Image: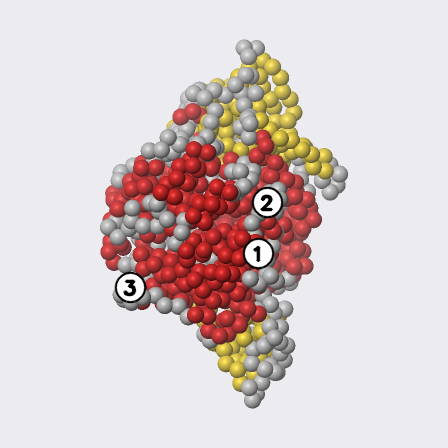
Amino acid sequence: MRSDTGQVVRLEDYRPSDYLIPEVRLAFRLDPDETYVTANLTVERRKGVSKNAPLVLDGDGLDLVTLHIDGKPAASDAFEAGPDLLTVTKVPETGRFELTIETRLAPSRNKALMGLYVSNGVFCTQCEAEGFRRITYFLDRPDVLAVYTVRIEADRKSVPLLLSNGNPVESGELGDDRHYAVWHDPFPKPSYLFALVAGDLGSIEDDFITASGRKVRLAIYVEHSKEGRAAYAMDALKRSMRWDEERFGREYDLDVFNIVAVSDFNMGAMENKGLNVFNDKYVLADEDTATDADFANIEAIIAHEYFHNWTGNRITCRDWFQLCLKEGLTVFRDHEFSADQRSRTVKRIAEVRTLRSHQFPEDQGPLAHPVRPGRYREINNFYTATVYEKGSEVVRMIRTILGEEKFRAGMDLYFERHDGQAVTIEDFVKVFEDASGSDLSQFALWYHQAGTPHVAATVRYDAAAKELQLDIEQSVPPTPGESRKKLMHIPLAFGLVGPDGEDIAYGEVEGVEVENSVLHVRKRKHSVRFRGVPQRPVLSINRGFSAPVTLSLEVRPEDRFFLARHDSDLFNRWQSLNTLFTGALIDASRRLRGGKTAEFPSELLAHPAELADDETLEHAFRAQALAVPTEADIAREIGSNIDPDAILSARLALQEGIAASGREVFERLYASLEDKGPFSPDAASAGRRALRNVLLEYISAVTGDPQIAVRQFHAATNMTDRAAALMVLAHRFAGTDATGEALAAFEKRYRDNPLVLDKWFQIQAMTPGAETVDLVRSLMEHPAFSMANPNRVRSLVGTFGSANQTGFNRADGEGYRFYARTVLELDKDNPQVAARLATAFRSWRSLEPGRREHARKALAEMAAVKGLSRDLRDIVERTLA
Ligand code: TRP
Ligand code: ZN
């Protein structure tokens, strides 16, 4: 493992490489303990570069065996080699030569899961962002594009399957029970998209005929006997391929498309050209083992990686600062895909919930950074919610500003102009300016300025003048390294809602530009006047969450209830109720801290039952609306001096109040919504299950009886219902016999299925209260738990840190101490995952003083450890700064 050198990479230091590598021939002789890699590189000095310029190649812990220049052993004074660097000091005159590098690797000992490693007996690679340099010396940067030919040789019996990027060209038997295969990828690509997978796997296969009539062979490789659980992923893949043709005019470009599921993987999945590698959690699903959320995630991630073929692979990033060029755009594309496959409003609500719970705290804490950062110490730490989710929001705003047609014209221009190139955010913004004639220079600040903008608005209606006065003010809070902020261009979709729920027409608007029901806020303050407004409207603003901002709008509670019932924008119906819940929860937690009891307005307690029973609304929408804000949501809104225990109590009290008020409705609906007929993972069926499972929580809260959940747990015919019942038991009835028995039954049934046991770990890790730290500690001793597997670690330890407010933030600091020690332990083997887990501390400054001090100490203890990885040191030091 590389430890930290403190070196910072800066965007302004970017310069093109002195050399290019247009062609790469790789040969692998695979063996778990001693693999040999021969890299034959065609190297070319770039025009205009000095003849004396050395060729400096990246490495990371490499063991050089031999080195040849133009087929001859390199003279000892022609190069300098170390584990992390290979410098060819004497480059042939002509500047064009062949460099042949032989390295020796030990994939079985690679615990960082970057480069070439072995997962459950399968050889696989992960090269993004800088993993290729753990395989061979290279110009390991995304603007060096090469055509790859890859030869893989391995034992025939134990490694029957040999895969790499591109199309298969040749395969055959060798003596000694060995065999080989050759792959060729005709599309020039950066090294981070290289992949190799070799092992003994089962598969399902299918064909896809592209819009222009080409046949593509599709295959998904999984461990033997798991083939049946890959069918949904295959279906999602074919739908993604069709959708990208229809919505973006993008066709697939190779003869084969392969997906491999592996069990040890640092992230969700990876878009290697023609050979996507997936965390098996995002491939394997059937009704007995996967929840509806799992199915939805699989659909989204299969689509995401497939969409990268055009947004990321055919057009890639010039440097890693441009990460959002591929990630933000591809998330936007997978969001659109899911919205088209399911319910647009429900999908949008889910997106906004994720944005607020993951990106907002990042943007509002010590790890805040722009969507396109300007510096980094460790690029792995910038695969963040800001780059991905806010990056997607920025693309979405471009569409809002330009409209669907001009947006599509801009995308078409992007593909036409930049195919085969490694480009920047500036190039991306420019295509939209050129295609639409709009000036996006102020808008582009969304890429360059960190922090969540705040919009404050007040409204006044003048009945006599029939005018609506709207005052808007924007501000962007300071973030690390950026104390003074520039004014943003914030597109706010809106409507003036009349008494019948219809938007009312208005006359001229002064003080702000309005186009297609979007207000374009560009100045610090806008004093807006709507003329010709016939009656007093209720303002519905930031419809569909058109801009990722925080908003304060003075609205009378009755107007919020009105919007919750009547806004034609369903997103804002959900938002209005959510805002009412949040306000009431903040109040209640203050009262509880002041030694008083929680109290809630009766209309708020009654509203959910009315909504649950509204047959005009989709089940999934009702489920979303009935879910009260999470403890983390409430904490974020309070913002400072947080006491998680008071928040938990307030939330439980609200749920009980709602349940008591709506009990009859909830019980009737719960009975009527039971799954009938065969299982289907489609959105409508999933929505029905989601609503029923929210109702189960309410009913259990008001009856105080675990038996309803016990019955559902045993009667369940799918994992969604089974896991939901177990969750209610484990969280609301912790420590009871009923819960103990259900947990034991679940464990027994799924003992041999690690992905399902992850749910069992996760549910228990989320148990509210001070004792959970001990529970988590003891579960780490469970035979199914392993520190070497990122899914296990995230399910148990990660969930405890990121989704257990009262456990992690235990008043005596034990949650932090346990967590910090576990992160340090993990850092020795897997820095990337360790650093990711450590981000759980990012909101430490908003805690009440006692907890804040405990958290600071835990962070300081980590910082004091010598030999921390660069990944973890970067996170810890920025969090403490
Ligand atoms: N590019 C991948 C995606 O978003 C994610 C990724 C980046 C990744 N780095 C990784 C996956 C390291 C695994 C390991 O689709
Ligand atoms: Zn991606």
Cα distance in 3D space between marks 3 and 1: 36 Å
Q: Residue pushed farthest right?
A: 213
Q: Residues within 10 Å of mark 2 (few under 14, many from 20)?
A: some
The residue pinned by badge 3 equals 593
Indicate the secondary structure of the residue bearing disc 3: helix
Q: Which mark is residue 681?
A: 2
> Front-most of 94 and 663?
663
Of the pair 539 and 305, the residue shown nearer to us: 539
Q: Say left or right for 857 vs 607.
A: left
**As drawn, is 122 to the left or to the right of 829?**
right
Q: Is residue 240 above or below residue 280?
A: below
Q: Earlier in the sequence, mark 1 or mark 2?
A: 1
Mark 2 touches mark 3? (CB < 8 Å): no
Q: Residue at x 46, y 70 (%)?
A: 603
Q: Earlier in the sequence, mark 2 or mark 3?
A: 3
649 displayed left or right of 235: left
